[in-house]
Image (spheres, rainbow, N blue to C red):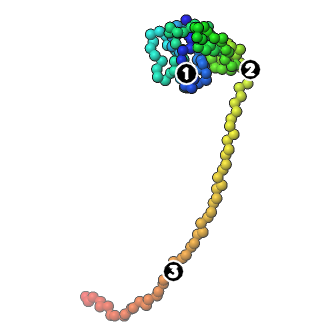
Amino acid sequence: PVPSPTTSCDGFCQGSYPFNCNPSLQDVVLYGCNQFGGCSYKKEGEGSLGSDFCVYKEVGTGDSCTCETDECKVVGPCNDIGECPEAVQQPDGTPCHSIPWGICKNGQCTEPSTSAPVTSTSAPVASTLAPIVSTLAPVVSTPAPVASTTAPVASTLAPVPSPTT
């Protein structure tokens, strides 16, 4: 069965329904998305998606309808009489996951065109060099005074006794 939306994850998951996730996988009963752009899918009996994921589709509830859709076409919740609303194509360039690095184009998940140039713009970086100011500290040389005194050396001529043999 193809799932139908049962819960709104607007404001929690990135983008809008189906939050850049695949809304139509075989045997999947729980479809979830998280705030980082991740998707999670559980089959019957595999348990819950975990607290990091918002369940945006659940299959097998009594109040669901079966709507044919894919990740590049959005089908809202069942109307009051249990019918599917008209599918709306996702904008061209919306990421899709059924093809590696796929993007939606005219309602289909396609490989990205390699002929289109990939442009990236970088934000200008303002760089100002702080001026380097070199100030030499004045060198003050003060020679310490050298005190030199010539004191007279007292010399006495005293007879030096010589040893007697």
Q: Which residue is mark 1?
A: 9
Which class describes the residues within 10 Å of circle 3: few (<14), some (14-19), or many (20+)?
A: few
Q: Secondary structure at mark 3?
A: loop
Query: Which one is closest to the eye, mark 1 or mark 3?
Result: 1
- Residue 98 can be seen in this image: no
Q: Which residue is mark 3?
A: 145
Q: Secondary structure at mark 1?
A: loop
Q: Give the percent coordinates (x, y) of residue 115.
A: 74, 20
The amino acid marked with disc number 3 is: Pro
Do the residues under discs 1 and 3 have CB atoms within 8 angstroms? no
The residue furthest left is: 165
Quadrant for the N terminus, please: top right
- Residue at 58% from the left image edge and 8% from the top image edge: 82
- Residue 42 can be seen in this image: yes
| Vertical placement of residue 102 versus 66, above or below | below
Q: Give the percent coordinates (x, y) of residue 130.
A: 64, 52
Residue 18 is left or right of residue 105, and the answer is: left
- Residue at 34% from the left image edge and 93% from the top image edge: 158
- Residue at 58% from the left image edge and 11% from the top image edge: 80
The mark nearer the N terminus, 3 or 2, is 2
Do the residues under discs 3 and 2 have CB atoms within 8 angstroms? no
Which class describes the residues within 10 Å of circle 1: few (<14), some (14-19), or many (20+)?
A: many
C-alpha distance separating marks 2 and 1: 36 Å
Q: Where residue 54 is drawn, which disc sits there?
A: none
The amino acid marked with disc number 2 is: Ser
The mark nearer the N terminus, 1 or 3, is 1
Q: Nearer the viewer, residue 26 or 74?
A: 74
Q: Which residue is mark 2?
A: 115
C-alpha distance separating marks 3 and 2: 88 Å
